[in-house]
Image: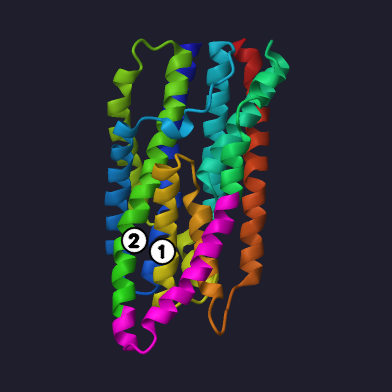
Amino acid sequence: MELLLMILVGVVMMPTLYVAGLHDVPNSIAIPVRTRALTPKLATRVAALFNTLGVLLALPLGLYMYSWFDFPAMDPGLTLAVILSALISLLGWNLFTYFQGVPTSTTHALLAALLGGSLAAVQVADIATEEVLALPWLTPLFTLLLSPLVAFGAAYLLVFLAVRLARGEDPNEVNRISRGVQSVSVGLTSMGTGLQQGQRFAFVLMLALAAAGATDPETWIAWSYVLFALLIGAGCLHGGWRIGHVLGHRLVAIDPLRGMVATTATSGLLFAGSLGLALPLSTSLTSASAIIGAGSNQRFATINWRQFRRIIIFWTATPLASGLSTAVLTLVMAPLVL
C-alpha cells in the first residue's frame, strides 16, 4: 500500500508543480508587461529561466525554511495519505483560483493542508492532538499574514523616495529607467519564487520518501530538483495571464515609476524573507500588496476596491478550503491504509 501511495504522490505532484509555476509567474511579470517594460513573450521566458534557476539553487540551501516542521509520528500509510490529500487539495485550489483570476498563496495553502490533514489523522489514529498543535505553526502563518502589510507599507513609503528622486527630471528618462529596473526585477522576483518553490516541494517529497521507507532518500533529491525546475519552468512559460490581467490591469492604475517601486519591493522582501530570515513567504500576497501600496500613493489613486475585496476573500478562504478539504480526504483514505 505504501508503494502505491508513493506512486500516487509522485503522479499528483507533477501537475501540481506545473500549476504552481503557472499560478506564480504573474507575480513577477504582470506589472512589467503592463508598463511595457518587457513584451509578454520575453517576460515569460525570463521568468521561466530564473524561476528554474531558483529551484536549482534551492538544492545546495537544503530545507532550512521548513526545518521547524517535524511530522507527527503515525502509520506510514496514514502519513502518505495526508501528503497525497494535501497535494490534491493544493492542486484543486490552485486550479480553481487560477480560472477565477485571483492570486493566492501556494505556501499558505500547503501549510494549512498539512495542518488539516494532521488534525484529521488524530481522529483515526493513536496520535495526541498536542503533538500536532505543539509544532510552531504560528510563526509561518503569522509571517504569511504579516507579509502583505509589510509589502504594502514598504511600497507606499518607497513611492515618496522615488518621486523625490525623479522630481525635475525628464519624464521620458524617468520612465525609461523605471522600465529598466522592472526588467531586472522580473529575474530577481522569479528567482526568489523558485527558491521558495524548490524548498517547498522538496520538503513534501522528503516527507513522502521517509514515510515510504525509501533507502537513502537523499539520493533522489538532486534528480527531483531537476524535474521540479523543468515542470515549474514549463508552467511559467504559459504566463498565467488570467491572474496577470487582474494584477496588471484590473487592480490599480499604475505608471512605470510606481510599477518599479512595486516590483522592487516584492523582490527585495522575497530575498530578505527567504534568504535572510529563512521564512516561507508568499510571492502572490507580497506582490499584490506591493502593487496596491505603490498604486495607492498617487494624486489620483484608482484602486479597484471591488477587485481588492474579492482578493481578500480568496486569501481568507485559502487556508480554510485547503485545510478542510485535506482533512476530509484524509478521513476518506484512512480506512484504506490502516
Q: Is residue 98 visible?
A: yes
Residue at image position (44%, 74%) is 161
Give percent across and percent down for residue 88: 54, 33
Label number found at residue 74: none
Q: Is residue 130 left or right of residue 25?
A: right
Q: Is residue 173 magenta-colored?
A: yes
**Which secondary structure, mark 2?**
helix
Instruction: Say which residue label 2 marks.
Output: 185
Figure quadrant of the C terminus? top right
- Above/below status of 7 relative to 203: above
Quarter of the image for residue 120 reads top right
Q: Which residues are magenta?
A: 146-175
Find out whether the residues at labels 1 and 2 contact each other: C-beta distance under 8 Å.
yes
Q: How is the image coloured?
A: rainbow
- The residue type indicated by label 2 comes to Ser
Give percent across and percent down for residue 76: 53, 12
Instruction: Say which residue label 1 marks.
Output: 263
- Above/below status of 251 relative to 315: below
Dominant SS in magenta: helix
**Of callouts 1 and 2, the N-terminal one:** 2
Residue at image position (65%, 19%) is 131
- Above/below status of 63 relative to 258: above
Residue at image position (41%, 40%) is 197
